[in-house]
């Protein structure tokens, strides 16, 4: 709480109402008639140190150093003087950070680690987000959707994939290919057997070496076996596809949690721009 804006600390839990003067700006008024403006801009989730320093410099110059990152990787600046809002927006726009993401808009897409860090991704979630937001950034800067639009991307469906409202995640469509020469040296076989959610993996011997085998009739192609046993390679440039789900919700904020529904599958995992995925998402949003 010591990092909050002084006005926010003094009025913690005492807010009377808030409004949105323009896209990307929140205006809160307390019961004590104190006001604070929040300016939200969009950034990438994974940033270099120079970009972070640039954002911090803008905070020092235009917002008395008060800045925070949201769960969706937006950056918010808090000011107690309404006259500081427009110069702050101008500085952010000039630096290349779009101001928006409030109200009924397409806010920043949250995503999982992708190829940069994760050891098991089927696709690059951050790359897909970059490609989608390049095409949807105008919807970020204006409030013309029927309601809030929150999207997520996930690199695989077994670990990070069960979330989101509009969710893009990778689905493998073929069982893993096993390199039997490496299994005995790399994998702890009982752990791999226990990890399979449908008991499709069992110990085996191939060419006199202890290894594993997959019952392809049981396998659901989830990829859970790959993290503890990399020789069970399931990623495939042809058979690892992207699926698009809508309607899901994890939290109970404003409405109850709900399952999401599959609306598009077998979209090609086609870096670096994923045009097929972008076309489907834009079509869904235009219909919405």
Image (cartoon, grey):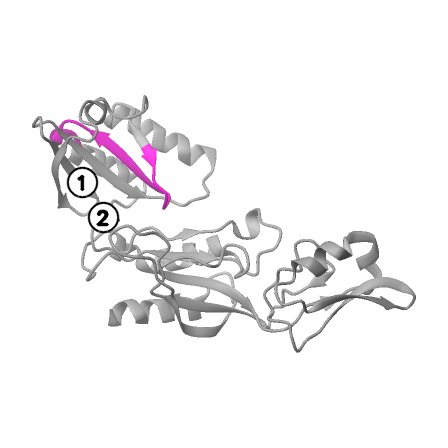
Compared across the picture, whether 266 is left or right of 110 comes to right
> Splitting the image into 4 quarters, where does residue 11 fall?
top left
Quadrant the N terminus occupies: top left
Residue 187 image position (x, y, % from top left): 77, 54
Q: Which residue is mark 1?
A: 26
Callout 2: SS: loop
| Label disc, if present, on residue 180 of the rendered structure | none
Magenta range is 68-84
Res 27 visible: yes
Q: Residues within 10 Å of mark 2 (few under 14, many from 20)?
A: many
- Helix, strand or loop at label 1? It is strand
Q: Which quadrant, please, contains the C terminus?
A: bottom left
The image quarter in which residue 250 lies: bottom left
Task: Indicate which disc, 2 or 1, sits on the residue closer to the N terminus.
Answer: 1
- Image coordinates for residue 265, horizontal then vertical, percent: 46, 74
Q: Is residue 89 found inside the magenta-colored segment of the image?
A: no
Is residue 177 placed above or below 142 in the rendered structure? below
Tell me the CA gap for discs 2 and 1: 8 Å
Look at 19% across and 62% down and name the residue there: 146
Name the outermost residue toward the left: 33
Residue bearing mark 2: 102
User: Does the stretch in magenta take in 70?
Assistant: yes
Q: How many marks?
A: 2
Find out whether the residues at labels 2 and 1 contact each other: C-beta distance under 8 Å. yes
Q: Is residue 99 left or right of residue 200?
A: left
Q: Nearer the viewer, residue 283 or 138?
A: 283
Residue 64 location, x and y as percent? 25, 23
Q: Position of residue 141 (x, y in %)?
A: 23, 51
Nearer to me, 79 or 270: 79
């Amino acid at each position: 709480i010591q990092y909050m804006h002084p006005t926010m600390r003094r009025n913690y839990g005492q807010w009377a109402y808030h409004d949105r003067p323009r896209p990307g700006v929140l205006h809160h008024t307390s019961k004590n008639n104190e006001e604070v403006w929040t300016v939200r801009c969009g950034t990438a989730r994974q940033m270099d140190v120079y970009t972070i320093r640039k954002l911090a410099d803008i905070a020092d110059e235009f917002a008395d150093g008060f800045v925070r990152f949201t769960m969706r990787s937006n950056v918010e600046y808090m000011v107690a003087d309404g006259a500081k809002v427009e110069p702050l927006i101008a500085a952010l726009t000039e630096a290349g950070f779009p101001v928006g993401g409030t109200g009924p808009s397409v806010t920043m897409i949250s995503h999982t680690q992708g190829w940069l860090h994760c050891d098991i991704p089927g696709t690059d979630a951050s790359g897909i987000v970059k490609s989608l937001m390049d095409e949807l950034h105008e919807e970020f800067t204006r409030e013309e959707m029927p309601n809030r639009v929150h999207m997520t991307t996930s690199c695989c469906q077994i670990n990070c994939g069960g979330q989101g409202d509009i969710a893009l995640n990778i689905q493998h469509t073929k069982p893993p290919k096993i390199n039997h020469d490496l299994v005995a040296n790399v994998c702890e076989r009982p752990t791999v057997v226990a990890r399979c959610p449908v008991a499709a993996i069992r110990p085996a011997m191939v060419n006199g070496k202890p290894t594993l085998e997959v019952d392809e009739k049981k396998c659901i192609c989830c990829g859970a076996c790959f993290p503890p046993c990399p020789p069970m390679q399931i990623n495939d440039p042809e058979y690892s596809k992207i699926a698009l789900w809508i309607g899901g919700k994890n939290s109970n904020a404003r409405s109850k949690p709900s399952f999401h529904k599959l609306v598009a599958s077998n979209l090609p995992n086609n870096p670096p721009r994923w045009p097929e995925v972008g076309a489907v998402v834009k079509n869904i949003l235009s219909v919405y």
